[in-house]
Image (tube, rainbow, N blue to C red):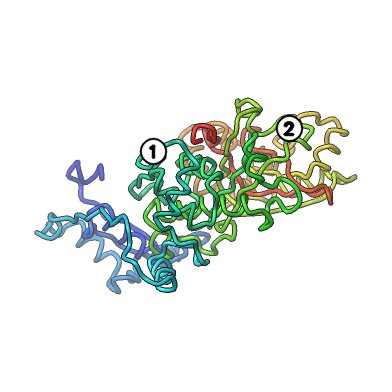
Amino acid sequence: MELEQAGVPSVALHTHVFARLAQSVARANGMPRTRQAYVPQPIVDLSPDQLRGYIDGTDPVSRRPFMQGVIEALTRPLDEDDLKGLTFERSTPRLLEPDTEDNLQQLFISNNWTDFLPIILPTEERVAAMLKGTSHPPDKVVGRLRPTSFREFWELTVEKVAVNAVMAGAKPEYLPVILAHAASGVTARSSSTTSLAMISVVNGPIRNEIGMSFGIGAMGPYNHANVTIGRAYNLLSINGQGGSVPGDTYMGTLGNPYNYSATFAEAEERSPWQPFHVQKGFKPSDSTVSIFFGGRYTASGFGPRATWKEKMIRCLTSIDHNQGPLLVMDPIVARLFVDLGFDSKEKLIDWCAENAQMPARDYWDDQWVQTLTHPLAVAGVEPFASKLKAKPDEMVKLFEPSDISIVVAGGETQGAWRMIGGAYRNKATVSVDAWR
């Protein structure tokens, strides 16, 4: 946009698998005639000769010589259709026409308003009952969401969140927790090609008030509050940001089962350490929701056994190097770590950050580090700039302590821990009490 505003012609270049997405984003931004050119996918790990072949070859979308298309796009004057742009009618009816339950269920599926499981139809009566779970007016804006930074923000009102809570099968007393998710500004349905999903952890008295699980099966489909709150978060992200449609507003190549429901509570009463929200500056009596960004990978282990250090280091060095982990530990594991001298989460986090190291050559060879971290290093952003100066065989740390999070949950039937891609982003802990 800055180039066009400065009067400099430009052409957007994409790989061909993003053609539908690129064209959709251009339409959504009122510029359907934006000039674009495409090269084949993939572009990673190819030789210079192979990449040069893309430039000398054919645009896989237009089926014309790639460079011919680029030159024409840069030199062809704008015509009337280019200058006209595009506008949209943004308003939608608040209510649907009455119909049979089967037809309405199919309507929601056909319009991509669901996660493709049956929903509770959000009638006026059901939404009104859900709204009794909060003191806030239905038209109050809770937050804004979008699937990517290239899309416009959509606003979510209390009523819109309540509609999705009904669809998910939640109870009115769960609504403040669901509103807190919406207020985070973090979508549960990111469009990243890496198949991201959000994981959320609930802390404070609200856990017991609404009967959330932090024991046996806390991360599975074994508790009504956990499951429907997580499902509502995903549904409101679909419907409150303009969709989650494969090839259009969703590009995750494999997808992610965490996108159904990934919400659980911390076992504060069984943990020897501070609750997560207290670590982030809240009082124990506060109720909160914390959002963890990722869900791409999962590693697991048991113990700590005699070789726990080697096991932990193997897991830490095998995961994505640009995204710190969320460690979910059964209370048994937490207490055993205390016996080893880790009487706080911070001490164990510091140990992980200090020992998660690898040669600089291997660190910079990681695809996501190359794509997302290398530009920061070149720009002089620390600690990445120092890592870039390291010799190929020099050991570099993968994570800072602030990149690593620990939450205690589990039913104490096994001393298990799980390491999940779950980067905690700044201000990603939201008050539930504010939405009562």
Secondary element at tag 2: helix
Quadrant of the snapshot with the N terminus: top left
- Could you say which is closer to the camera, residue 86 or residue 396? 86
Report whether residue 425 is seen.
Answer: yes
Image quadrant in which you'd find residue 400: top right
Q: What residue type is labelled 1?
A: Pro
Judge left or right: residue 91 versus residue 237.
left
Residue 345, labelled with which disc?
A: 2
Secondary element at tag 1: loop
Residue at 51% across / 52% down in the picture? 232
Residue at 28% across / 64% down in the picture? 67
Q: Where is residue 181 in the image (x, y as percent from the top left)?
A: 51, 43
Q: Position of residue 419 (x, y in %)?
A: 70, 48
What crowding class fits label 2: few (fewer than 14 Cα within 10 Å), some (14-19), or many (20 or more)?
many
Q: Give the CA separation, mark 1 to mark 2.
A: 40 Å
Judge left or right: residue 307 versus residue 95.
right
Q: Nearer the viewer, mark 1 or mark 2?
A: 1
Sequence-earlier tag: 1 or 2: 1
